[in-house]
Amino acid sequence: MEESLTLKKLRERFPASIIDTHSFRGDDTAVIKRVDVVDICRFLKESPDLSYNFLMDLTAVDYLQMGNSPKEGRFEVVYHLYSLKYNHRVRIKSPLTEADPTIDSLTPLWAVANWLERECWDMFGIRFDGHPDLKRILLYEQFEGHPLRKDYPLTGRQPLIGPKN
Amino acid sequence: MAIESALGESVVLTRTDKVLGWARKYSLFLYPFVTACCGMEYMAAAASHYDIDRFGAGLPRFSPRQADVLFVVGTISHKQAPILKRVWEQMCEPKWVVAFGGCTCSGGPYDNYATVQGIDTIVPVDVYIPGCPPRPETVLDGIMKLQEKIQSQKQEL
């Protein structure tokens, strides 16, 4: 199966960086250590027989209320890669701790990572090292906090004008 | 009475307020402040099938300085609120505001960090048109309610 070829190659090439892999009904997922995210993505992009040349999505999940301890990884950054050449996909996930939610930027590999990482910073407060211009993209500069974090209050409105109702 | 009988039916006598209200209610120039999905329903209501030109409201103006009625159509976020306020401030008197759809009336389904809970917290609203989105008939009803309101107002010159 071509999907498991990706995971097999990843395990061979980065044995120390892969925390876990699994496949479910053709969806391949690799959980990786954050230090190697750029190397792993470059490998996936540039290997001729993998050729994951399209970063489809980049987002994050806050597992605060789902049992993950803040130390081992409250957040998880999720990357979805797609190969236009082979028509296959892979999901890369990388846990980040609450104390240091930082990961290397993928902007050297994909220009689209620029805005996706800014959105991720805006909503989750995850820092992307090496990003050329890491600032809010959807919310306004005066906004304090990151609203998609589970400890941000649902109705934590910060109006620019008008009452705080 | 002598003058009226002398003039016959060539002259109509009325009050200034009444004639100004009549003129104003049938020449509504809308400013569609469209931010979300309600915009599609506004377009449906404004297109030929429902023909809001019957009410003199068929010509949207995309400059607030040329508009009388601010049609706020769609969800207003806190980031958008200062822009809405500024557009309203740029409109000349007399002016009216219509809240089109559930989001503009009350925030609608969005009770979260981003959404203004009703535009009446930012600008004064004359007519609320509920619905998610409102049916074109509801929109026409709203326009007729606004016309009644304009006709019955004291007309400032």
Image (cartoon, coloured by chain):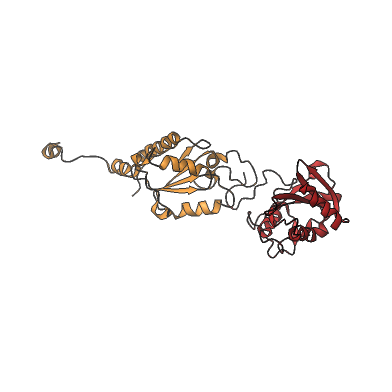
Q: Is residue A112 above or below residue A67?
A: below
B88 left or right, relative to A159 = left
On the image, the x and y values in percent for residue A60 come to 74, 50
A90 left or right, relative to B37 = right
On the image, the x and y values in percent for residue B50 come to 39, 37
Q: Quadrant of residue B155?
A: top left
| Numbered marks: total | 0
Residue at the image point whose x is 34% and y is 39% from the top: B54
Q: Is residue B125 visible?
A: no
A95 left or right, relative to B107 = right
Looking at the picture, tell me which residue is in the foreground, A32 or B131. Answer: A32
On the image, the x and y values in percent for residue B63 come to 42, 55
Looking at the picture, tell me which residue is in the foreground, A118 or B84. Answer: A118
Looking at the picture, tell me which residue is in the foreground, B87 or A62. Answer: A62
Q: Residue furthest left?
A: B6
Residue at the image point whose x is 56% and y is 39% from the top: B106
B126 left or right, relative to A80 = left
Q: Colour of chain A?
A: red
Q: Is residue A164 above or below residue A116?
A: above
Residue at the image point whose x is 59% and y is 52% from the top: B79
On the image, the x and y values in percent for residue B52 come to 37, 40
Looking at the picture, tell me which residue is in the foreground, A105 or A141. Answer: A105
Q: Is residue A92 visible?
A: yes
Figure quadrant of the N terminus of chain B? top left
In the image, the chain rendered in orange is B
